[in-house]
Amino acid sequence: MVTAIYPALREKGGIWLGWSGKTAPRQLSLTAKNYLKGNIEFLTIDFTESEVENYYSGFSNRTLWPLVHSFPTKVRMKDEEYKAYNRVNRKFAEVLYPHLQPGDIIWVQDYHLIPLGMNLRKMGWGGPIGFFLHTPFPPSEIFWILPWARQMLDDFMCYDLVGFHTEKFRENFESSLSIDFEGKYENHCFRKGRENLKTGVYPIGIDPQSFREWSVSPKALKQVNSIGKYIGDRAMILGVDRLDYTKGIVERLKTFERFLEKYPLWKRRVSLIQISSPSRTRITEYINQKRQVEMMVGEINGRFADADWTPISYLYRSYDQESLAGFYRSANICFVSPLRDGMNLVAKEYVASQSNNPGVLVLSRFCGAAEYMKEAVIVNPYDLDGTARALKLALEMPQNERKSRWISLMERVERNSAKAWRDRFLSDLTSRQPDFYPDITLETDGKSLDGVMVPFGKTRKTDLPFDKNGAES
């Protein structure tokens, strides 16, 4: 997500509000910290240990994350975690609201912050608020297993525009919004009473020029030379992921094992380098995933390795983008095989880092990128035999076909860049603002709060509709 948002915000400037990644006692966690980097003001807040456990590790990553990725058996539902989710979103709103000025545009990113728009509306903000979901949106029959599905759809209705990576994700959202939810759809616009929500499809991208430059930088070339000494004249298959059960890393390792079984002539001629950056290391499911991956790597290497050849190199660490560009440049195949993914920018980063002798992108059909990158070798990661055959096809693909596919892919990567994603979304968000906003009345402790909402956030600021302890009045 940062790969796309940072270049998108860097050009125009603005405030980037988020969690600092640190914890603090409750009284200190309410104090926002800010610093400038170029024309971006970073505004951060700390969480308490309880907020990390219940909001972040709990509802965000043990309830919403598996839900939106259609892993219903992994969804954990606890009332106290949902309450913490709403409390933290009110906290973000309280921090942001005093910084808002007439003419501001608010763009909320991802599932951690769905109720943020609703909280800002309650405070009296009448300017444009957009929301973008960086994950998939699940089919309605999965979304509605959530006990708080209706409340969350009400939260969505407080946005002017909600964006998705693909048409399928938008269809799933609109289907959920239509089930037992009174309102009317017309041209992807849902009207319920005085609320009016527009949906749109905006495939997120990267900054391809940066990856072109990084791939030939001294740091990347040093990485290329280091890999070359290790790989030698063997072919290289590369996997780059956060360590997450949605990324299909276990299935990827099983596929590579099946490949070596089915095509023994490729033994000693190919190596898999799997980079897995640490992720959500406090959550049990991720701890178990790490153990399973490490065990599988050891078993496969123990079974197939020779004294001078290790089939799999497993790197459990994070690399900066410049170093990753060196890995991308070296790889004959980039093996992107999530079981479910919103977009997957690794696929686009790999394409942007290639030269005139490009490698092959092997891509899961279950990620959003597959909808736009048809020239990749598309696979079903659950089908080990079929995906093993696809790896053989990619390794044996002649240069002219590799180059033809890469040229077409690169055109799409450049057309759907991070800048294009930003410009399309913000253009649609601002273009649908009406000439005026109607007066609204907010109820709090028996008193009304009048906010006269006019274009682009020109509001009369009022007392916040929350008591001193952060609870709704």
Image (tube, rainbow, N blue to C red):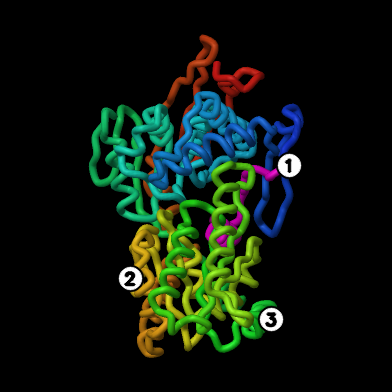
Q: Secondary structure at mark 2?
A: loop
* Among the 4 quarters of the image, the one containing residue 317: bottom right
Q: Label 3 amino acid?
A: Lys
The tag earlier along the polypeptide, 2 or 1, is 1
> Is-magenta flag for residue 220?
no
| Label located before the other in sequence (2 or 3) | 3
For the residue marked with disc 2, what is the amino acid? Lys
* Residue sitting nearer the eye, 251 or 416: 251
Q: Is residue 400 left or right of residue 214?
A: left
Residue 452 locus on image (x, y percent)? 48, 28
- The residue shown at (53%, 70%) is 303
* Residue matched to label 1: 33
Residue 340 can be seen, yes or no? yes
The answer to whether residue 420 shows anywhere in this view is no
Residue stretch in magenta: 1-22
Q: How many angstroms separate mark 2 from mark 1 (CA)?
A: 44 Å
Q: Is residue 24 above or below residue 225?
A: above
Q: Is residue 443 left or right of residue 467?
A: left
> Where's residue 363, x and y in %?
40, 67
Front one among 72 and 153:
72
**In the depicted view, which residue is nearer to us: 389 or 334?**
389
Quarter containing the C terminus? top right
Q: Which residue is mark 3?
A: 222
